[in-house]
Image (cartoon, rainbow, N blue to C red):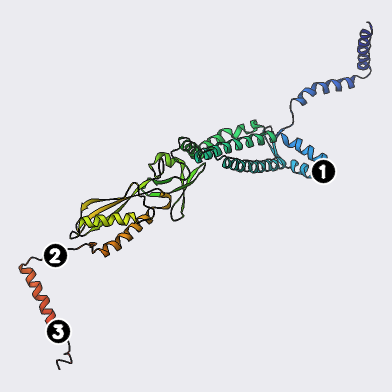
Amino acid sequence: MTAPTDAATSSSGNSAIDMLLNPQGSEVASSAASNAPAAAATPAPDDAVGAADSIRDAVTQHSMTVGEIINKLDAIGFTVGSTRISVWSALLVFMVIAATIIFARIGSRLAHSMFNRLTRLSPTQQVLGEKLLTLIVWAVAILMAIDVLGINLTALTVFSGAFGLAIGFGLQKTFGNLIAGIILLMDRSIKPGDVIAVSDQAGNSTFGQIRKIGIRAVSVTTRDRREYLIPNEQLMINQVENWSYSSKVVRIQVPVGVSYNADIKLAEELMMQAAKEAKRVLETPPPSAWLDSYGDSSVNFVIQCWIDDPEEGVGNVRSEVLKNLWWLFKEHDVEIPFPQRDINLRGNEQFEHLIAAIAQRMEKRDDALPPRKSEE
């Protein structure tokens, strides 16, 4: 029980003897002890990428040559505040970002193929599921990249305000189009395969079939194989005419004019026959012919016919109906009118002087011409 006390007493005695024998050494020791906390209070700058050192050490253990190259790259850098940024850190971030993008794209493709196999889902549900799963894959990939790099996010506090403000203004439309696309898919107002007509702010109309609903825009393919990328927000703000929202059966109007001297009843029968002979015109509802108006040179009719495949176009149906009607009108002597004008000239003194001057000029021209051989 007395051993610890004796040891402490002996140690204190030895320290006292040392101070008496070597006073300078004790001063040096005491100064070093006083400076030790100060040295510990100024640590080395932290690397912006926390995993850079651990990855460098792991690579060095497997290959000294690659480790030396990494050490040289790590030696090149600069310090911002308490954070050090080196070439090795920047290169590591670039490689992880590239790997993250590749992983996210592969995951998106796998999600697309998986939803294509689920035949029970409707096209709208498939597209919505693909978009949501794609967002989840990208979010997981980004979080994994941050975790792998061990990035110290406090190093970006200096730039976080300006960076966040720039992202807010720069990606405002992007996030708006993303949310608009999700809403369009959720309410099923627009889905791939629908035939729509969209009018922009200038009044220009675009008619075509929806091929794809993307994160930013909707791809609409027209009959002339032109593909328009319409932002998702435009489909929510502007008026959209969906020809296949609840049903693909749509009505087409074909205007026709006949002469005032034509038999209207016969013309109507020929119009009905021309519409029925068109291949894509449906039998039910049956086509009809309406008298629309009395024009300047013709009696105007409108042929109403129905189709159930608007994605195949409507201009070709009008063309076929008009071609059939052309030959039927020719066969039954139904006149297709053209604009005609009757001119009535009122006689007055100035008009008579004008006629006389023209006649006198014509006589002078005839006198100046050489005589014909028959007259000689």
Q: Nearer the viewer, residue 75 or 278?
A: 278
Q: Quick check: marks 2 and 1 in contact, CB under 8 Å?
A: no
Badge 3 is on which residue?
A: 366
Q: How many marks?
A: 3
For marks 2 and 1, the one nearer the N-term is 1
For marks 2 and 3, the one nearer the N-term is 2
Q: Amino acid at mark 1?
A: Ser
Residue 207 visible in the picture: no
Dividing the picture into quarters, in which one does residue 35 lie? Answer: top right
Dividing the picture into quarters, in which one does residue 373 lie? Answer: bottom left
Image quadrant containing the C terminus: bottom left
Distance from label 2 to label 1 (Cα)?
A: 102 Å
The numbered disc on residue 63 is 1
- The location of residue 334, given as percent across then percent down, is 23, 62
Secondary-structure class at tag 3: helix
Distance from label 3 to label 1 (Cα)?
A: 112 Å
Dividing the picture into quarters, in which one does residue 85 lie? Answer: top right
Instruction: For label 2, count other residues whose C-alpha is less than 10 Å away and answer few (under 14), some (14-19) or many (20+).
Output: few
